Amino acid sequence: MRKIDKSKIFSTRYKDWEAGLEKKGIAHPVYNSSKNKYYKDVVLNLLHVQGGLCAYTEMKLCPKELIEKSNWKNGSFIEDNPQFKGQLDHFDPDLKTDKAWLWDNFFMVDTDINTKVKGKKKIDPILKPDLEAYREEELLEYDCNMHIYIPNSSLDVEKQNKVKEMILKLGINFDPVIDSRKEYLNDKLTQKNFGIPIEINQFPTAFKMCETNN
């Protein structure tokens, strides 16, 4: 799970609206998903900063062409019916009541991860990927044989336990994800070993860690 820089804002109409709510200190409108006028702008801007991948599992949610800068005009996403997978996730579910449209609390994630794994579970920010202090290589290791993430062995026991708990809550080692990641990475690593040009459009952190360990 790589670091995400959420400072690049193309959906400026949404962001101005959200910033106005925060400046006034008033409660956000109730979260009504796609019925909100800014839903599409939030989703597509998140997909852009996430590189079209699930923020937690790094599975592909949309093609890169969909999230190019040219698809925004006057601070809004211009396509009427964009095709993508996944759902908006409130990282800290406790903020959903009064700050339902807070940019800092949003990520786009795989639908099964959001509905079957994470849900409304209490979270620890240690694996919040948009934090300034977040560094995946300092917090995580990747077992390239089992194709699972584990806490970095250099962390103290308390931090290892926190990371391990959040790996589970964010679905990073959800069984179907492990299967997809294993198949994809084994194929890409085999191609690379045979000198075949490759493009990594899913699971880039796991690929990088396996590549480093080879």
Image (cartoon, helix red, strand yellow):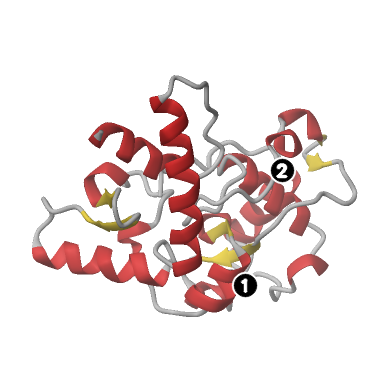
Depth check: give the residue in front, 92 or 160: 160
Residue 168 quadrant: bottom left
Which residue is disc 2 drawn over?
A: 11
Depth check: give the residue in front, 195 or 165: 195
Q: Residue 11 appears at what percent x and percent y?
A: 72, 43
Q: Is residue 65 above or below residue 3?
A: above
Query: Alpha-carbon distance for marks 2 and 1?
Result: 21 Å
- Secondary structure of residue under mark 2: loop
Q: Is residue 203 left or right of residue 132?
A: right
Q: Residue at x 47, y 30 (%)?
A: 191
| Residue 210 appearing in the image | yes
Q: Residue at x 49, y 75 (%)?
A: 117
The amino acid pointed to by label 1 is: Ala
| Residue 135 appearing in the image | no
Q: What residue occupies the far front of the structure in this picture?
A: 194
Q: Residue at x 19, y 69 (%)?
A: 161
Q: Residue 196 appears at what percent x and percent y?
A: 50, 22
Which residue is disc 1 drawn over?
A: 27
Q: Is residue 68 left or right of residue 162?
A: right
Q: Residue 36 appears at what percent x and percent y?
A: 79, 65
Q: Residue at x 13, y 54 (%)?
A: 153
Question: N-terminal of the two: label 2 or label 1?
Answer: 2
